[in-house]
Image (cartoon, grey):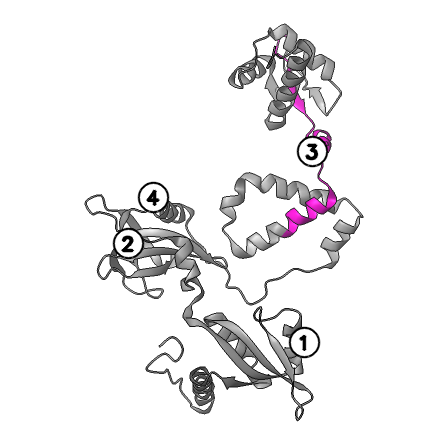
Amino acid sequence: MEGHTTKGESLTIRCIYMLLALYERPRTVAELESYLQEKGLAQVSRRSLQRNLEDLEGHFGLYREEREAVNAADVWNLAQQDFEKLLELEDPVALALVIAEQQLNQLGPMTVFAPVQSLFERAREQLASRNTTASLWLKRVKVSAASHRLVGPELANEQSQRLLDVALRQVAIRLHYHPHQGDPAQVIRATALAVFYRGAVAYLIVRDHSNDRVRQLPFSRISEVREVVTEDARVGDFDLDTYAASGALAYRFGDPFQLEAVVFNSIRREIEDAPLGEDQELLELADQPHCRLLRVTVPYTLNLVQWLLARAAYLKIIGPDDFRDKFQEELQRALKNFESEQLCVPAERNFGS
């Protein structure tokens, strides 16, 4: 009959489930009986379960704990290291898990990955005990972020969970927001829309009810949040993927544009194999053999501007004209601060204005 399970197959399935149950924690036969019933397996007598366990004893790390009293029920347990040999990962897979955990630590939030934390730990322990190519790779190759990342702020876990909860449910809220540490709270009525992490820094995306503007507020500057049941949520047409595609999460200043610049060899080496864009060109300059003419379409974001400013001594922006002028103005503002005794803060922003 289709779907029929033979006696031998039932025994195999029952034994697998019992081993998995004991991998979680030690159990008596009575506890194993309840566990198997919860899993929907056919009921068998406790005597049969005891015989099954006795047959498996000594295999896969299965053993009986020492009885506390003569008439006490047997407590069955698993030596986890012995049992985990059945679940051993291939070393390249273990390496991928360890590197993935390192990257996730940079991005956050690690609380999301708590259910697989034991898998990460098992991968680390396995590689630590090996002398394979994968384990040597982990010991001798360093993986770090492509640019500086802020260290995540210390946050109260309960408050963070509350902020995440209101964003997942997209409800109307009232929150206390502090522009800077120590500032009095600003009371904001808004709709929680989503959460995003810039590096390890968490932000709550909200629609401000006072002006209908979408804002990004760091978790660390929110001291209180409460759901407002007397006010309707204003989600509107907000879509997180569309919002991210607009560049809003990357401090977008404008539309992508074609950058043209003369770059020194140090920058050339940096971007030849890791280009700034898919259409990147590096053209020879007859009168400057140690430089190249760079042409590439780039996103107009804070990351781009900061990348260029960090290399300003080794490049010359040629175009477009408006970007070149803004870049020059930014350098002049920086120079003015070096030449002045006090910090000169611009009255208006340069980029993004």
Q: Nearer the viewer, residue 243 or 164?
A: 243
Query: Which range of residues does the magenta coloring cover?
Result: 70-99
Q: Amino acid at mark 3?
A: Leu
Q: Is the residue under label 1 in contact with that under label 3 (CB below 8 Å)? A: no
- Residue position for label 2: 175
Q: Nearer the viewer, residue 90 or 162?
A: 90
Q: CA distance from mark 3 to mark 2?
A: 47 Å
Label 4 SS: helix
Name the residue: 67% across, 76% down.
Answer: 269
- Residue position for label 1: 269
Q: Is residue 197 left or right of residue 139?
A: left
Q: Nearer the viewer, residue 345 or 41?
A: 41
Q: Magenta stretch: residue 275 in it?
A: no
Q: Residues within 10 Å of mark 2 (few under 14, many from 20)?
A: many
- Residue position for label 3: 87
Q: CA distance from mark 4 to mark 2?
A: 16 Å
Name the residue: 42% across, 67% down.
Answer: 251
Q: Amino acid at mark 2?
A: Leu
